[in-house]
């Protein structure tokens, strides 16, 4: 684009452009465009890891409405121990005739990224609120217990996979009231 601007500035058909010479303001827009910041690899990795973390919980929420412990969506954003724990939890609910209704509120942040600059492992910290995400009996729709939800400290490991995707590989949810 700069070449076109310079050609127009030197064109003999337009005396105004010839008179203004190289000090025209036309090149300024290309300079402004080239200096716009682009996200670093580390910033992108952090965003991708947080997206995978949130998506894992959304997949779990959807599967929990029927306690579908075999939902293929669970493996979209979780693998390893994380996937095993999600499936086991849903299987236990299925076995016990429970479903989960509602939606958790998440507020994840990145605690660390390794290695710095081009991470492949991100540690996520969260304070998940399960106040409106509770277990119910599938047969009658009644609350499964009288325990209210609450705010739970959650720690998760999110790792870059061989295909370039990010998946939660492990997580831990602490008792209500831990954050």
Image (spheres, helix red, strand yellow):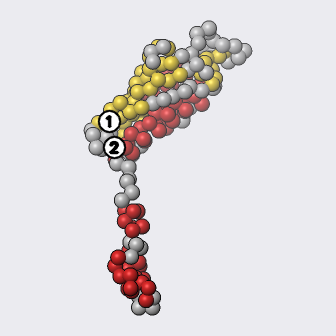
Rendered-image quadrant of the C terminus:
top left
Residue 144, quarter of the rendered image:
top right
The answer to whether mark 2 and mark 1 are in CB contact below 8 A is yes
User: Is residue 18 visible from the viewing direction of this image?
Assistant: yes
Above or below: residue 73 compared with residue 33: above
**Badge 2 local density, few (<14 within 10 Å), some, or many (20+)?**
some
Give the Cα distance between marks 2 and 1.
8 Å
Decide which of tag 2 and tag 1 comes sooner along the chain: 2
Compared across the picture, whether 97 is left or right of 82 comes to: right
Place of residue 100 in the rendered image (x, y in percent of width and height, measured from the top left): 61, 21
Above or below: residue 143 compared with residue 68: above
Which residue is drawn at the image coordinates 35% and 82% (left, top)? 21
Which residue is drawn at the image coordinates 44% and 23% (left, top)? 154
Residue 1, quarter of the rendered image:
bottom left
Residue sitting nearer the eye, 22 or 125: 22
Place of residue 24 in the rendered image (x, y in percent of width and height, measured from the top left): 39, 76
Residue sitting nearer the eye, 134 or 111: 111
Which residue is drawn at the image coordinates 58% and 10% (left, top)? 147
> Label 2 belongs to which residue?
42
User: Is residue 81 visible from the viewing direction of this image?
Assistant: no
Place of residue 34 in the rendered image (x, y in percent of width and height, measured from the top left): 37, 62
Q: Secondary structure at mark 1?
A: strand
> Label 1 belongs to which residue?
113
Place of residue 94 in the rendered image (x, y in percent of width and height, measured from the top left): 60, 19
Which residue is drawn at the image coordinates 55% and 27% (left, top)? 105
Residue sitting nearer the eye, 133 or 178: 178
**Badge 1 local density, few (<14 within 10 Å), some, or many (20+)?**
many
């Amino acid at each position: 684009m700069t070449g076109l601007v310079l050609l127009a500035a030197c064109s003999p058909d337009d005396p105004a452009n010839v008179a203004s010479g190289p000090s025209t303001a036309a090149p300024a827009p290309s300079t402004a465009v080239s200096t716009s910041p682009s996200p670093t690899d580390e910033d992108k990795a952090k965003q991708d890891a947080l997206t995978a973390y949130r998506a894992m919980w959304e997949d779990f929420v959807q599967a929990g409405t029927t306690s579908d412990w075999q939902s293929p969506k669970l493996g979209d954003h979780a693998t390893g121990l994380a996937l095993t724990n999600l499936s086991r939890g849903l299987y236990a609910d299925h076995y016990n005739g429970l479903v989960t209704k509602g939606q958790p509120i998440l507020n994840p942040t990145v605690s660390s990224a390794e290695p710095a600059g081009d991470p492949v492992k991100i540690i996520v910290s969260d304070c998940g609120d399960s106040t409106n995400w509770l277990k119910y009996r599938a047969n009658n729709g009644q609350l499964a217990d009288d325990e209210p939800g609450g705010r739970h400290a959650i720690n998760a490991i999110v790792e870059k996979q061989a295909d370039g995707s990010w998946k939660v590989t492990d997580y831990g949810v602490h008792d209500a009231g831990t954050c």
